[in-house]
Image (cartoon, helix red, strand yellow):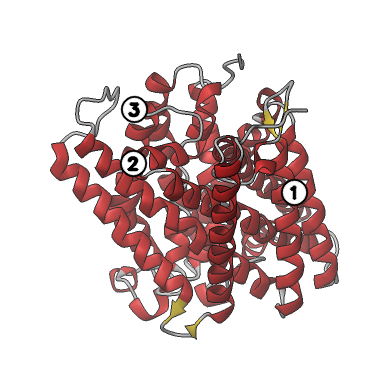
Amino acid sequence: MKDKTLGKKDLVLFTVSAILLLDTLASAATVGVSSIFWWLFLGLTFFLPFALISAEMSCSYPEQGGIYAWIKTAYGSRWAARASWGYWVNTAVWIPAISILFAGIFKQLFFPDLSLSSQIAIGITLTWITVAVNIVSLDIGKFVPDSGAILKVLIFLVLIIAGFNHVSEHGMANDFSMAALKPDWQASFQYIPAIIYGMLGFELVSASSQEMKNPARDMPKAVLISALIIILLYIFGTIAMLAAIPSQDINLVEGLMDTLYLLMGDTPAGKTFAFALGIAALYTFFTNGVTWALGCNRAAAEAAKVGELPKIFAWEIKKTGTPLGASIMMGLVSTVTILLYGVLAGSNEDLFWSLFAFSAVIFMLPYIAMMLAFIKSRIDDPEHVRPYKIPGGIFIARLFAFSCITILSMAIVLFIYSPEEGMQWMVLAGVVVTIAIGEMIILSTEKSKASTASTSITI
C-alpha cells in the first residue's frame, strides 16, 4: 500500500505551484491596464466556478487519475482516453515552452549573446531533468512543487512591493485611469486566452489522490485557500509590472527580468537582488514543469493500466509506484517538439508563443469534457455522497459549468485565430496533427486490448 504523503499544506502548495505562473504574468500585462478588468471579470465568471467544481469533484470522486477518472465515469473509456491523451500531450508540448522561457531568462542573467540553438539545448536538458524528478518517489518529488510554490509567492510579493515603491517615486508607466481599465477588445484578443490558461489546474493534484491523507476533508479547503492566494497575486503582480514598464514594451520571455531590474534600481545592491530573484525565477520555471508532469503522468499511467493508452505508459517502478513509462515518453515528445518548432521560430519570443498557444489549445479541450462530466454526475448520480457540494442546486451547477465551457471555447478560438494577426497556422497544424495522432493511438490500443488483456509492467 502506498504511504499517504500529501496533507492540506502540500495540496495548497502543489496547486499554487501548478497555477501561479510567472510567464502568465508577462502575457497578461501585454494586454495593458485593461488586463486588471479581465483578471477580475474572469476571476468571477471562470476562476471561482472552476475552483468550486474541482473541489466538489475531487472530494466526491477521489479515484486515482483525477480528471481521467471523472470523464470515464461519465462518458466511458474512449472519451476518457481522449481526455487523458490531450491532458498528457499538452504537458509534453508545454514543457518545451517553459524550458525556452527558462533559457531566455538564463541568457539574460548569464550569457546575453547566447544563440537560439544553445537555448534549445538548455531546454532539452531541463526536460530530461524533469523526467528524472518524476521517477523518484512522491515523498521526495513533492519537495519540488512545494519549494517552487513558496519561491513564486515570494517573487510575486517582492514584485508587488517594489512596484508600489516605484510608483511613489516615479509615477506610473501606464495610464491607470478608469477609461484605461475598460476592456480594449482589439488589443486584448491575442493575450486574453493566456489569462484563462493561467487559471487552470485545480484538479491536477487529484490525480495523486491515493497519496492524500484525507482528500474529502483537505481538498475543498486547499482549493479555496489556493484560489484566494493565486488571484490576489496575479492581480497585484500585473499592476506592479504595468507600473514599471509601458505595456507595448513588455517582452513575453524577458519581461520579468526587465521589470525586476527596473524596480530594484541601478545600485549594486539592487542589481544583485534582482539577479538573485532571477535565479529563483529560473527554479520556479523548472518546478512548473515538474508539477504538471507529476499529475499528468500519473493520470496517463492509470489510463494505460486499463488498456486505454499504450502499455508503455503503464510501466512503473515497483518500489516507488512512480510512472516510468509515461515520464520517458513525455521526455521524448518534448524533445522532438522543441527541435521541430525551434527550426521554424525566428526568436525565443516567437518560439515560446507558438509552443505555448499550441499546447494550450490541446490542454483546454479535456476541461470542456470535465465540465460536462460534472453536470452529468449531478444528474445521473444525485444521491452520491459529496463531502463538499456547490450550493444552489442543479441550476447553479449548470450555470457554473456552462460559464466555464463558454470561456474555454472562446479561449481556444482566440489561440487559433487572432483578429489582429489572422489565422495562426502553426498552432492549428500542431493541434490537428496532435489530435490525429491521439485518435490513431487510441484505436490501436483498443484493438490490442480486444486481442489480449492489458497489464502494467513493473521494474
Q: Find disc 2 in the rendering and name its residue.
A: 74
Quarter of the picture containing the N terminus is top right
First-in-chain label (1 vs 2)? 2
Task: Tell me the quarter of the image containing the C terminus.
Answer: top right
Mark 1 is on which residue type? Ile
Residue 309 placed where, x, y %? 58, 46
At a point 56% along the width and 58% down the height, the residue shown is 438
In this rendering, the answer to whether 424 lies above or below 402 is below
Tag of residue 382: none
User: Mark 1, mark 2: which one is toward the viewer?
Assistant: 2
Q: Nearer the viewer, mark 3 or mark 2?
A: 2
Mark 3: which secondary structure? Answer: helix
Crowding at mark 3 (Cα within 10 Å: few <14, some 14-19, many 20+): some
Q: Which residue has dot 3 on it?
A: 60
Residue 251 quadrant:
bottom right
Neighbour tally class for label 2: few under 14, some 14-19, many 20 plus, Cα within 10 Å: many
Helix, strand or loop under label 2: helix
